[in-house]
Amino acid sequence: MRRLGFGAMRLAFGGSVRDPETAATVLRSAVDSGVNHIDTAGFYGFGDLHSHEVIRQALSPYPADLVIATKVGPVIEGGVVPTAEAKPDQLRQLVEEDLRRLGVDRLDLVYLRVGGATAAPGGVSIGDRFAALAQLREEGLVRHLGVSNVDAEQLAEAQAIAPVAAVQNQFHVHFRGDSELVAQCAKDGIAYVPFFPVGGGGAPIDHDRLKAVAERHGATTRQVALAWLLAVSPAILAIPGTSVLDHLTENIAAAGLALTDEDMAALSE
């Protein structure tokens, strides 16, 4: 996979886009620009617009090199935001729903998302739930497994059950609590896929602190934030999301922004 992919959440929740065809245009443009990694989830969406259906409408039949990653675990019990978690015996149904909604026979990558939509990582065992997904992998319904919103102990618990291909946690230039876990993923050959790569979820980026580096490169601060992620570890795959074509072009261009050692030092201050 290319290291800069596309997160589909904003297609379903973006305030400026509630039209499925507009969302599909953004997706097609991403793939036409070389993106071959799309991150989605069955709980991304409300009303008549959901990311799975937009992805299928826009891109099926899928390009041979396209990797679609999805997440299971959070359960919506009324409203829009997931407020509960699936039990081990409920995960098969969620995977089968993703297969049907995306129109595929096998899911490329399935994360076990831990803690619903908002809980902090850690503190609970994930073994039973991850084992349920590992069984689906053995049956051929899933190609690769990942874990999301986890700490190092939970990652180790999952690794003892089945191979972990990717970790998806919150991490960005000004939210670096996972630095040791990023290093561990690089050591173990695991992709680390940060969500909210340019801020969000109560942890914003301080764009003023990025301005000097951005001005040196004639770039935006968002591009610098994305370039920092790609530079800080070879394990990182970035998945910025957007519902605006201009922002998509800006995000994709960030993959070509080469930060210097001086830049990296300045961004660490």
Image (cartoon, helix red, strand yellow):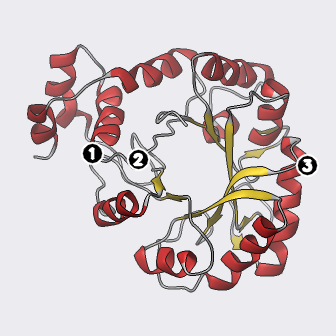
**210 left or right of 16 in image:** left
Which residue is label 3 attached to?
100
The residue drawn where x is 63% and y is 68% is 116
- From the viewer's perspective, is 120 left or right of 57? left
Decide: is 260 above or below 236: above
- Amino acid under label 3? Arg
Query: Looking at numbered disc 1 in the image, what kind of residue is underneath it?
Result: Val
Crowding at label 3, few (<14), some or many (≥20) Cα neighbours within 10 Å?
Answer: some
- Report helix, strand or loop for mark 2: loop
**If the image is split into quadrants, where does the N terminus sit?**
top right
Q: Position of residue 29 (x, y in %)?
A: 64, 17
Q: Secondary structure at mark 3?
A: helix
Q: Quadrant of residue 250?
A: top left
Q: In the rendered structure, are the residues bearing label 2 and label 1 in contact, judged by CB atoms less than 8 Å apart? A: yes
Nearest the viewer among 257 and 170 is 257
**Location of mark 2 (residue):** 236
Q: CA distance from mark 2 to mark 1?
A: 8 Å
Mark 1 and mark 3: Cα distance apart in space? 37 Å
The front one of 241 and 265 is: 265
Residue topped by disc 1:
232
Tell me which label, 3 or 2, sits earlier in the chain. 3
Q: Residue 150, relative to residue 127: is it above or below?
A: above
| Whole-percent x, y for residue 206 in the image | 25, 41
Q: Residue at x 36, y 57 (%)?
A: 186
